[in-house]
Each structure stands twice: as C-alpha cells, then as structure tokens.
Image (tube, rainbow, N blue to C red):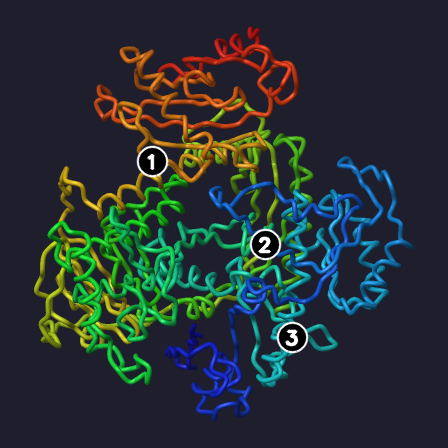
Amino acid sequence: TFTDIVARTPDGHTKALKLLSENPGAYDDAALEGIRRFLGVRTNGPIPADKIAHVKMGTTVATNALLERKGEPTVLVINKGLKDQLEIGYQARPDIFAQKIVKPEMLYARVIEADQRTRADGMVERPLDKNALRADLKTARDQGIDSVAIVLMHSYAYSEAEMEAAAIARELGFTQISVSNEVSPLIKIVGRGDTTVADAYLSPILRRYIEGISSKLNGRKSGDVNRSGKDTEEQSTGPKLMFMASSGGLTAAELFQGRDAILSGPAGGVVGAAATARLAGFDKMIGFDMGGTSTDVSHYDGRFEHSFETEVAGVRLRAPILRIHTVAAGGGSIISFDGTRFRVGPESAGAFPGPKCYRNGGPLTVTDANVMLGKLKPEYFPAIFGPQQNECLDSESVRAEFSEMAFKAGDDRTPEQIADGVIRIAVENMANAIKKISVQRGYDVTEYLLNCFGGAGGQHACQIADVLGMETVLLHPLSGVLSAYGMGLADIRASRQTSIERALDKALMSKLNSIAEELEQACRADLEQQGITDVRIFARVHLCYHGTDTALAVDLASPKTMRCAFEAEHLRRFGFVSPGRQIDVATLEVECTGGGASTDEPVLDQTRDPLPEPREQTSFFSRDCWHCAPVYMRNQLKPGHKVDGPALIIEDNQTVVVEPDWRAQITQHDHLLLKRVTPRTRESISERADPILLEVFNNLFMSIAEQMGEALRNTSQSVNIKERLDFSCAIFDAEGALVANAPHMPVHLGSMDASVETIIRENRDALRPGDVWMLNAPYNGGTHLPDITVITPVFDKDEKEILFYVASRGHHEDVGGLAPGSITPRATHIEEEGVYIDNFKLVENGRFLEQETMALLSGAK
C-alpha cells in the first residue's frame, strides 16, 4: 500500500517519508518521487544525481509478478520423461480439508523434454541430443519466448549437459538463460527446478524495472568499472544503485536476479530490527512487524536465520531467504461470532473498505476493537476517511456494532468486554506465530527483546510480551519505516552453496576445505566488483542424521567440533540426540559480507526536567476494567523521561499503548523502551463456558499439536512423513477424549481417541513418567496396519497425576504382510496384512525398548 523512504543527510541526520505506492495521477514511481521530495525537486522532474551517494532499495516488483503470474513467458527444459515433475511436486496437500483443490498455476509457458540422462553417480547414460534440443528451442524462440530455464537431473553435481543446453539457447538468441546448477546448485530437482524457473520468469521483469530506475537517477549502476578494472565512483557523479536481496544483504543492481527478490521488502525489516536492537544493547531479538492484513515475525540471536526451502505463491524455492513467519493477523483482521465462539481473522478488511471506523461500510476489525476500548483516539488521526476523505474515524458506528455483538452473545458482557476479548484472541494468535520461530525451535523467548515495528505493533506490544513472558519491548523512532531504514544499514552480501551429500569424517575435510576456498573466491569476486575489499567470511556446513532431511547449520571446523555443535543444536531443537549415528554433510555454504553503513546514532544528554504535562487525560479499557490514562505526544518526551502505564503515547505513525504494570522510558538514543515493572500474576479461569476463552484455548492447544507435527516431520526418515505429510498429531484429556488436533489427516483423527482410551483402559495403574505406548490394532482405534500410533502420558510437575495425553499417528510404507505396501485383497486374516501391534510398550522410563521392538517386528506371523 505504502512505499517508505528514508534519507540520511551528509551530517548524519535521518528523514522519513511515506507515499502511496500507486498514485498514477500524481507521480510515476513512489521511490523516485520520495527522492525528489527530499531534494526539493518538482514531481517527475530530473533528479540531480550528483547530490546522491547511494540508493539502496527493496522492491515488490518480482513478488507482485509472482503472485499475479505476470512474469516473462518462459520455456522449461527438463529431462525426457519428467515433463510434469514440477507440477507433481512432493504430493504435499497445503489444505488437507479443502473439497476443491486449486493447484497453483505453473510459471512456464511450455516444456521441452531433452533426451539426456545422467545417473546419480555421474555416469552419462544418454548424452544430450543437441540437434533435437536445438530444433525445439528454435520453435519456442520463433513463438516469441525469450526466457529459458534449464533443469536436468543430478546437475547440482554434474553440470556438463546443462551447460551444453545453455550454449545452444545462447546461440539461438534467448535473452534470459537460467541454469539450475548456477541458480540453485542443491540436491532435489523439484525445489531446484522451481527456483530456476522463477529466476527465468522474474529476472527480465526485474531487469527492466532496474534499468528504468537507473536511467531516472542519471547515474551509474553499482559496481560499474572502467577499462582499468577500477571502480568508477570517483569519476562519476551518479549514485551507486543497490537492491535488498531476500537473504538480508544488499547487492549491486546488475547482479540482482529474480530468485533474490521474492522477499526483498520484509528482509529489510529484519535487518533493521536486528541493527536497532544491537544499538539499544540487546543481542537477542524477536522482530514483530504488525501491519493491516498480516504480521511478520523473525528471530535473531547474533546471526540471521536463513531458510533454504521456502514456498511462496505455490513456488518452492531452494535459495537462502531470511526466515520470516507470516500470520494472517493485523489491524484489518475481521471479527466474527458464530453463536458459540468469537474468531479473529484470517480474513481481512483490506485497505478498502477497511475497518468499520473508516466510514466505508467495512466489517468490525481489530482496529475497531482498539477504538472501542479507547486505545485509538479519533482526534489524533488525520481527517482522511469517508467517501470524500475528509472525516475522522467513526467511533459511534463501532460502538453500535459491538453493542449488537454483545447482545447476540447473550451472556451479560458489555461491548468493551467483547472488544477486550477479541483483542486477547488476536494477541494469542500473534504470540503463537512468535512461538513457531522461537519456542518451537528450542529458544527461550523470555531472554529476548521484542522489537516492534509496523503501524499497529505499538497497540499490542505489551500484551504480546506478557503472553510470551518477555520483559522488554523496543520501538525505534523510525519503527514505522524500519524496513527502509534496515536497507540503508544492511551489509553487501554474496553467498554460494553447493551440495556435498557425504558422511562427516576426517577423509572429507580436505575436500570440504578445498570447495570452501573456491566458494570464498567467487564471493570475494562479487564484492570486489562492487568496490568492497574489506570482507568478513563465514563458512558453514549443514549437517543431518543419515536418512533425515532436516539439516542444521554449524560453523566449518574439525569433524569432532562440528559433531558436538550439531548434537547440541539437535538436542535444543528436537529434544534428543542419537550418539554414534552417522552424520551427513548435506550442504556447504560460504558467505562474504562488508560495506554496510554505520549504525551509530547520536547519544543524547539525559534530561533533568520533570515529565511534561500530558496533552490530555483519557481512559481506556483493558484486562476487564477501565483505567485512567494520560496522553503524551512523542515529541514531548526527552531522553531520561519515564511514563508509567496505563498511558498512551502518540507518535507520527502509530499509537503506543503502555499497559498497566509497564513503564515507558526514552533512552539516550531517543528509543522508546517499554519494561514490565510489576511481576505477572497467574490469571484465574472461570469454569463457566466462555466464548472468548474457548477460542483462545482452542488456538493454544492447536498450536501445541502443530508444533508436535513439525517436530515429527523434521526428524522423520520416511518420505511419507516428511514430504507427503501422511501423519496426525493430537492432544487428549486424562480420560482419552480429544481436546485439540492439528489440521492433519481426518481418517487418523476420527478414531485416534479410541486408541488412547485403549492404552488407558489396559494400563491405568501401570502408566509411569517416561513411558510411551504403541499400537496399530484396527479393533482398538487403528485404521489399517501401516498407520502406527504412539501415545505418551504427560504428568504434572510432581510426576504423580496424568494431566493429558499426546498421540501421533503416521503411515509407514510397509509393515510386512503378503504384498508390498501391506495392503492386499488376498489377506484372509489380520496378520496377513502385516505386523499386528496392540498395547505395546515402546519406551520405558525414557529408554527405547529396542530389543523388544525388534522381537515384535521379526516375530510377526
């Protein structure tokens, strides 16, 4: 909706500006218009390039083209027989309950099947039929297709055939040639293929945009060199043009490719959040970017976290992308009541019609709830709402809607209590998103700073911190434009990855070190091309247990050191290690960084002046009661001032709610730091049916079940589990009744409670902490024998009383029987289908009963 622009003046001061991203009647490009306004140039006028040193940008051009399927027409070249491989994918079902499955549209316009086959060991079974490929590519070229993606089997390791195909495409005049061994030299043809196609599909669109920006800036592109090979910065008056990559680093405009641009904008927010947190004195940070339709959360503990497998708009990407988790919860999330419980989102009111208070006939939203509670004051908003865009926020219609909702609930709640309750639901949803990138990955979130940015984060920051047990919240003065600010601070980065797929041992080390040197040289060359010679080098290996897919990154070191680091990380992430088990090196990664802008901000004197008089006294509703609250304007407060909650602080782009038991203070860098000053107290829960708490606990328990499923998938060796997702996880009460399940397999979940009840019935007096039971018996809640269920009782902290049970059921490829797959019409009794398991103890007091399990499997009838 908006484009954020931040400028740093020669004396080190920063200025910020927000413009509508699309405003055709006013200007041609929002970013360029922002530059013009900072320089005092008329709209669409020529930009004095000699007054600008650097331009660092993020862009949604590639993202929008991907979402709207408006990229460059592309032809895919893939091995004969694999024409539909990328469309088939991994068989994963994103929405398991969908009755009408809508498959994402493929990015390529046509497919050419190249007659060539290289085996996994490098042996060429069939050389490339160049004549046939040349004829097929010429046909595509004659049809007007200029972009080609070349993806051949095992080319991550053996690239000769791909390079031969690329040479033919070059001869025929294709202007964009993306080759998988260059774009994504990693194992897995589906992810590698999708990434290469996306690069071919998006790079031409991106290149045209960059050329347009560069021509308007009337200067060189970053990294242009003269004939002597030296950077021409001293010889040119034009600015360096750089773009933010999804990996969190800047890169020269001419090196910026489609695969790098998918999450260009959000990456700047993570970098900015990390930089401002470090400046404030915090090494561990949770980034919390709450906007109108969604919330982005990220984790930082001194090192940026990257994902090498990401899905965006139905496209699987195998490239380094900053790990950002998005949840459909924002200021525009729609509030609804179905007669039993209240819900918040995932639907959003969007920019139009927007929330109810925008006077466009929109639905009730989270923003409206804050208006109802008095946390958003209409008088501090500009009069830009309504049909003529000249009215203030409409609080009266909001009150009327919440009053009607309270009447429908029929339990004597006031409209304020309803609004307070739905805010609690929204807060829990966003807190669950943070748990997925922190608690679910083994991090203790209570040790972290919550760094809030985006337009709506300050309204909920204290409440989210309370839910997570966090004590400190940071709001930077530029929090409303932190993504743009982060791009200005980011390092220039270059990285290379390559698949290894070998066992970790001493014999591998010379090869690892040799490859690391080659990758480092390539990264250095990229940075030197951009004028960066002082670089920092990071070499990491991605390790996994043999047979599993979840690789964990550790620094390149000796085999013993890497094994220890891997096991420590595996224990933290998944709660167990397997001593003596083979560890494989999946990927080697080298990254070089340098050239980032200084993050220094002026240190201001602490004022001795008393806290100024508030602009006014108001009241807001929170925690089921009204609170008197002073209202301060942010520009009233100086470093050293402290404001005790409850209070409201009004900034240019947001309202900050200081909840009771919290204190806001202005630091020496003019940051707004919120700290809890009173210990939290445990909330008592009524036994009365409560539609608010029903939704809160439903989401909470479902989140636990989803975390169970994620741990199961990440540690599994089975393709059925880790790719097809043929498993289910659920929570049951002490009597075996279903409490909550993740959105997994319906056929599993429908009968799993009977399996839990069987274990309770057969072992009621024998269940002990650390025990795990297993069964697949169809007569006791099982489905068919390949679906095996494991059930674990969870005890109280004194290990005396069972509080609840957790259970997981997964499909196994084969459990014996007359036919492969353990499903055959020839079976005349249950044992002929496979191993029959009923009420079997799998783990006792935390010890895996391996011998007993082997005896069960080998002694089957």
Q: Which residue is mark 2?
A: 104
- Residue 396, image x, y percentages: 18, 72
Report, in whole angstroms, how far the alpha carbon at label 2 lies from the one at label 3. 26 Å
The secondary structure type at the circle numbered 2 is loop
The numbered mark at residue 445 is none
Q: Is residue 282 left or right of residue 618?
A: right
Give neighbour class at mark 3: few <14, some 14-19, many 20+ (Cα, 10 Å). Answer: few
Quadrant containing the C terminus is: top right
In this picture, is 779 found above or below 255?
A: above
**Kind of residue indicated by mark 1:** Ala
Q: Please indicate, yes or no, whether residue 492 appears anywhere in the rendered image.
A: no
Q: Which residue is mark 3?
A: 208
Residue 569 is drawn in which quadrant?
top left
The numbered mark at residue 740 is 1
Give neighbour class at mark 2: few <14, some 14-19, many 20+ (Cα, 10 Å). Answer: few
**Kind of residue indicated by mark 2:** Pro
Q: Earlier in the sequence, mark 2 or mark 3?
A: 2
**Which is nearer the eye, 720 or 56?**
720
Q: Earlier in the sequence, mark 1 or mark 2?
A: 2
Numbered disc in front, either 2 or 3: 2
